[in-house]
Amino acid sequence: MPETARTQFDVEALVAELTLEEKASLCLGSTFWHTAPVERLGIPRIMVADGPHGLRAQMNEADHVGLSGSVPAICFPTASGLGSSWNVELFRAVGEALGRETKKWGVSVLLGPGVNMKRSPLCGRNFEYVSEDPWLAGELATAMVHGVQSQGVGTSLKHYAANNQEEDRLRVSAEVDERTLREIYLPAFERVVKNAQPWTVMCAYNRVNGTYASEHHWLLTEVLREEWGFDGVVVSDWGAVHDRVASLQGGLDLEMPPKLGVSDAAIVEAVNEGELELTVLDGAVRRMLRLVDAVQPALAEGATFDVDEHHGLARRAAHESAVLLKNDGSVLPLQAGQGSSVAVIGEFAQTPRYQGAGSSQVNPTRLDVPLDELKAGMGVGVEVRFASGFGIGTTDGDAHKLAEAVEAARGADHVLLFLGLPAAAESEGFDRTDMDLPANQINLVHALAEVHDRIIVVLANGSSVTLTGWQDKVAAILECWLSGQAAGGAVADLLFGVANPSGKLAET
């Protein structure tokens, strides 16, 4: 925080002192991740960063996804996994941890959680959303918002509203009647806003009934503010603003990232020409000033966090996210005594899939590898045979890998088969084309079933997959979702019975 920055704003006095140009500047960012300062009046800029399941803070001002690394942070299970815990207290604890890490790095607003409904199981971003159930999503996200904001930093509830697909998300119009909006697509947002008052709400890219969400007066002003009582800042998703003046009139306070020299000039011109009422601009400025003021104590205080403690919480969260879908003959928990052999098959056992792709991608402080954790947990005297079985960058079969896997399974006392969706199958920016596991993995299941009848499958996926066609070939299925950086240790705990897979499906 600059030495000249105010520590307690007199908002009305500042609004009176600000020039029109300064007011316009406060309604858009100054960099990709920062709000605009007004140094003349001691108003500092603040930083926002991605992170629905872990902080993704890129400290260079021009950074964006893929340009450079983000700071090391704990990668917790994604929302689709955490949602299966049905545990309000766990969401609160994860939120508190996220808040501490956010505060430690000088970030003031964490861009999450996401509570969009899973209208289609094929949405590429479903791993970022809690549940297809509005009530459950609202309850759990409320706890996370409380947790994060208890640390003196803000959240951004997203993506408001009806952002239920990635395909053509920048232009598509979600055609939804009001009853359906109020019964399905809005209740989770409403519950969080009324019960937790997130400091910001992020509008979606898409249009709703023909009007861009960033300009939607009924959604942003009439419903969000006037009906639900939201008093925070409405921020755009990155690049979601098409008309800065129309979006201000609709109820959007902060454009990110900024179109410097364009959006601010348009605001000034619109006020001068009577197209935009100054009272509308002043309302947005007041909300921005209150947000900047609210985060100053946390910035001044700073924070530290215990990396090992947070990793332990991530492991516990992975435990509670896991759902035991099948356990014929009580093959789990695994009993691997001295002199026994265990075949660990599947590339995901040594190259774990633990998070989704896109803007939520975290640079983990460490990564537990399932194969290593299993070997450590089995102890002396247990033979562990590993075979990759398939490649994770392709759906094509590999006869050599397949043969190695069959040979490893043949005669083994136990077979642990790690399956899942590759990173290229589910990501922000595009949707899946089907719900099946890759063909090379399904073929592997059938081949292994020819030589072993007690196969235990461990799944790593961010959204629903079909089991039809192969579930009767295996004895047990443990759904572990994308369970974060501690997934490896958590999976070992679950398989050995150290932890109980207590999760319940939050989607069908």
Image (spheres, rainbow, N blue to C red):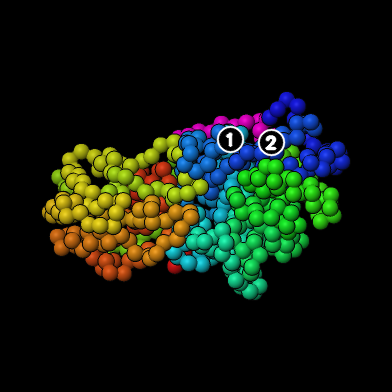
In this orientation, does residue 288 appear? no
Q: Which amino acid type is shown beneath numbered disc 2?
A: Arg
* Residue 264 visible from this viewpoint: yes
Q: Quadrant of the N terminus?
A: top right
- Does residue 174 lie above or below 246 as drawn? below
Few, some or many residues within 10 Å of mark 2 (<14, 14–19, 20+): many
Point 35% across, 53% down: residue: 422
Within the magenta stretch, is there residue 309? Answer: yes
Residue density around tag 1, few if under 14, some if 14–19, many if 20 or more, within 10 Å = few
Magenta stretch: residue 274 in it?
A: no
State which region is magenta: 295-310
Q: Earlier in the sequence, mark 2 or mark 1?
A: 2
Q: Which mark is residue 61?
A: 1
Which element carries disc 1, helix, strand or loop? loop
Image quadrant where one finds the C terminus: bottom left
Q: Give the Cα separation between the discs numbered 2 and 1.
A: 12 Å
Magenta residues, dominant SS class: helix
Residue shown at 37% from the left, 49% from the top? 353
How far across and how far down the image is residue 42, in percent? 77, 31
What residue sits right under mark 2 in the picture? 45
Q: Which quadrant of the view contains residue 251?
A: bottom right
Q: Amino acid at mark 1?
A: Glu
Q: Nearer the viewer, mark 2 or mark 1?
A: 1
Where residue 382 appears, x then y in whole percent? 19, 43
* Relative horizontal placement of residue 61, taking residue 30 as reference (left or right): left
Tell me which residue sits at (21%, 63%) in the image.
446
**What is the quadrant of residue 505 in the picture?**
bottom left
**Along the line of sight, which residue is nearer the eye, 125 or 450?**
125
Circle on res. 373:
none
* 236 to the left or right of 118: right
